[in-house]
Image (spheres, rainbow, N blue to C red):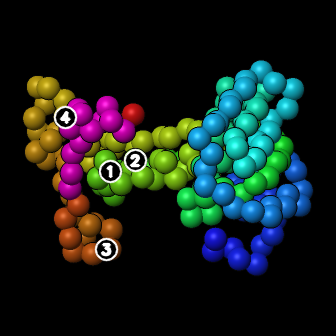
Amino acid sequence: LFFNDMKYIDNLLTPQIKSENVEYKKEIEVPRIVEVYTEEDVNSVEITEDSICIRGKSEEETKQGINYVKQLELLFDGKVPVCEFEFFSPAWKHRGFMIDVCRHFMAAEELKRIIRAMALAGYNCFHWHLTDDQGWRFKVDGYDKLESISASRNFSEYNNYDMKHEGIYSDEELADVV
């Protein structure tokens, strides 16, 4: 754990959990038994030495509980702490972020890595800016010039650097990211 001096996990998780001063005394390998319950009276995560139990009021809250366990696994280097905590229902139905690949093209693999990280942080909506006067990032049958002209531009128009910025997503990459 890279938070050696912290004995409470409630300050490590995003978004903040409902329980305060959640102590852990032991780190364990991730248990093989994972129980998930939906339509419960409470949103909670319980990690024992034998199992993980996630309870959620709805499917979305159950997914949020699963993401808390994934966060803990990342924070504790592949292990999880033995602990129990309750968490809030999301304050907003949508918690989103946007990536503008028209101006700053990114490979599909990099986009998927960012989306996974944002999901762990509680984001559930992704706005992907694929078309603009600055760039066009997918093929359209019958409009070959969109690919040959609009999938490339120079940074010099923004006085950033003298370099070309280009790229287009295949149908397979679009489907994979979505």
- Residue linked to disc 4: 139
Q: Secondary structure at mark 3?
A: loop
Q: What are the residue bounds of the magenta stretch? A: 166-177
Q: Within 10 angstroms of label 1, few (less than 14), some, or many (20 or more) residues? A: few
Image location of residue 153, percent across then percent down: 21, 58
Q: Are the residues tagged 2 and 4 within 8 Å (C-beta)? A: no
Q: Is residue 22 magenta?
A: no
Q: Indicate which disc residue 172 carries.
A: none
Q: Indicate which disc residue 109 carries.
A: 1
Three-letter amino acid code of the residue under disc 4: Lys
Which of disc 4 and disc 3 is earlier in sequence? 4
Three-letter amino acid code of the residue under disc 3: Asn
Q: Secondary structure at mark 1?
A: helix
- Whole-angstrom CA distance, mark 1 to mark 3, is 28 Å
The answer to which image quadrant residue 92 occupies is: top right
**Marks 2 and 3: which is nearer the front?**
2
Three-letter amino acid code of the residue under disc 1: Glu
Determine the residue positioned at 42% across, 52% down: 113
Which of disc 1 and disc 4 is earlier in sequence? 1
Which of disc 3 and disc 1 is earlier in sequence? 1
Which of disc 3 and disc 2 is earlier in sequence? 2
Q: Are the residues tagged 3 and 4 within 8 Å (C-beta)? A: no
- Residue linked to disc 3: 159
Q: Indicate which disc residue 112 carries.
A: 2
Three-letter amino acid code of the residue under disc 2: Lys
